[in-house]
Amino acid sequence: MSGIHMFVGSAQAQADSIKTMTEKEVQGYEAVLQSLNQFLSAEDLQTDAYNNGKAFFSGVLIPTVQAGILVSEAVGSAAQKFVTEYQAKVDPSDLKSEELEEKIQKLDTQIQHLEHLTTTMNKSDASESIKSTALLHQKMQMNCLTNAKKVLQETLDKLKLFHAESPAIFSEIAALEAAAKQGASQAKAGFNGQKFIMPTDLAWKSVVATKWKEYQDDKANNEFNKLKERIKKDGLPATKAEILADYHWSTIYNMYVHTKTGIPSPEVTTLYNKLIQAENRPQENQQLAFYNEMLRTGKHPITGKAITEAERLNAKAMVYALALQPFYYTALLGGAQPYIEKYIADLNKADDMLDVDGPGTYTGRYKKKFHSLDNIEMRKVEYTKRPRAEYNQLRSKFDNGIRKNFLKQLGENTEYLNSLGFDSEQIGMIQNGRPPKGWQVHHQLPLDDSGTNDFSNLLLIKTSPDHSVITTYQKNTTGHLLENQSMTLDWPFFNGQVYPTKNP
């Protein structure tokens, strides 16, 4: 084996240089990502060409840019980790394996020479007192030489082990680079001169999606820790009880406001959402995720082969056992039996599966009770927390005209509203741009995410419990997100422009 050299100063300088370079790369990628998200959220663009571009941008370009960020972050992090792990596991100073081996060899020679002297002394005719003194001195020397050799040998062994294991520090980069290259290749070839063509092989996105979630979670944790430090430094409340004692929720600012001063606090709002999320964070069930994936794709998650009918039925049974059975009797005590039974009945239908895109039933909680919403389509969405300035601008437009115009347009179809059970007074209110009592206008894809004020994204919905179930779900699943943070989740969509389709 050739010599192994480690120069800590040079390695650290190289790691710092790489970190600076990758940070600049990430800044560039984030600027591109922000531009893409702005394009996707443009309300004034609703043409077929825009929709075609939107699908390609969200399906190919954004994951490709995310892959670029992940590669840069992984390279910068690995370069730093290489140095820190060497110093922690091997030695804080420079080392050369051949120098260590040379020193060990010299010590071996000295030890052998000392062993020869000891043998000679034992055979000599010297007096016992002289022998004892000489042998004691030689033993002390032997201990020193042996210990010195042991330290050098251990250092050499650690250096060789680090040399063998250190490539693992950079191992995840290769998969991310491959995904980034494939995404870039598809992005380059995706436009045929007239429109974007969505690639058929998007398997590379799964690698990006998994690592992107981990990256976002780590980033959120770091930001949360910085937030807690700032809250401690500024003397702000640090617990739910302290927050609720001094702050109240403001629908005007869409955040917590100090009760006495009236000053809104993004820091307190973020902390409160984080505390709520931590209390209600579900424990990931890997078995449940495995069978859900099998039902969603129709393929075995490991082999990739299409599953048989028997495997599909077994997966459904496992989903029931893993997701519902542990809580069945607890739920019965809360009066949820009808909903549980309906949920199981839906699960037993051939086309109704958990965690699958398509029409079905969504069961959620509101005011400690289960409520089932029928004719719901659950779709996978990449939920990204919109910057508050953009959100407030869109919300202002909605409150100051778009809601009213949507209702007026809906009110033009009196026959449709009559068929849903609305009376003349309610229809009159809709025609005047006002929701009937107990109803409100809902954004299918929230403004908090990438939703728009386009009429196709709006729905007249019963406030309680239907809309309340959805908003409760939204708060519990996305309330912890900071601006521009993302997560993948199932999101409920309604069919038509009114829900429910029968006004009681």
Image (cartoon, rainbow, N blue to C red):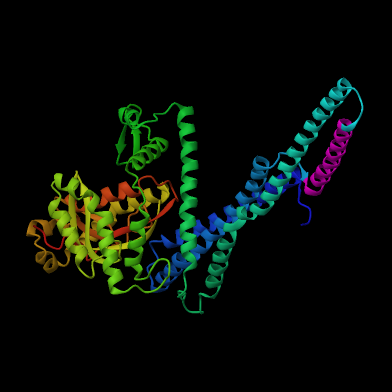
Q: Quadrant of residue 295?
A: bottom left
Image point (45%, 51%), residue name: 484
Q: Nearer the viewer, residue 239 or 159?
A: 159
Q: Is residue 301 left or right of residue 433?
A: right
Start-end of magenta stretch: 96-122
Q: Residue furthest right?
A: 125
> Principal SS element in the magenta part?
helix
Q: Give percent across and percent down for residue 187.
A: 53, 70
Image coordinates for residue 452, horizontal then vertical, percent = 35, 59
Residue at coordinates 50% horizontally, 42% vertically from top-left?
A: 222
Q: Is residue 171 magenta?
A: no
In the image, residue 252 lies at what x, y percent? 31, 41
User: In front here: 235 or 199?
Assistant: 199
Tell whether position 105 is magenta. Answer: yes
Image vertical order of residue 84 relative to residue 310, above or below:
above
Q: Is residue 331 left or right of residue 50?
A: left
Q: Residue at x 83, y 40 (%)?
A: 107
- Quadrant (top left/top right/bottom left/bottom right) for the N terminus: bottom right
The answer to whether residue 221 of the structure is visible from this angle is yes
Residue 312, given in percent of the width and then of the height, sits at 29, 69
Among the 4 quarters of the image, the one containing residue 103 = top right
Q: Quadrant of the C terminus?
A: bottom left
The quarter holding residue 352 reads bottom left
The image shows residue 367, relative to residue 402, as above or below, that is above
Asked whether, in this view, residue 164 is left or right of residue 463, the answer is: right
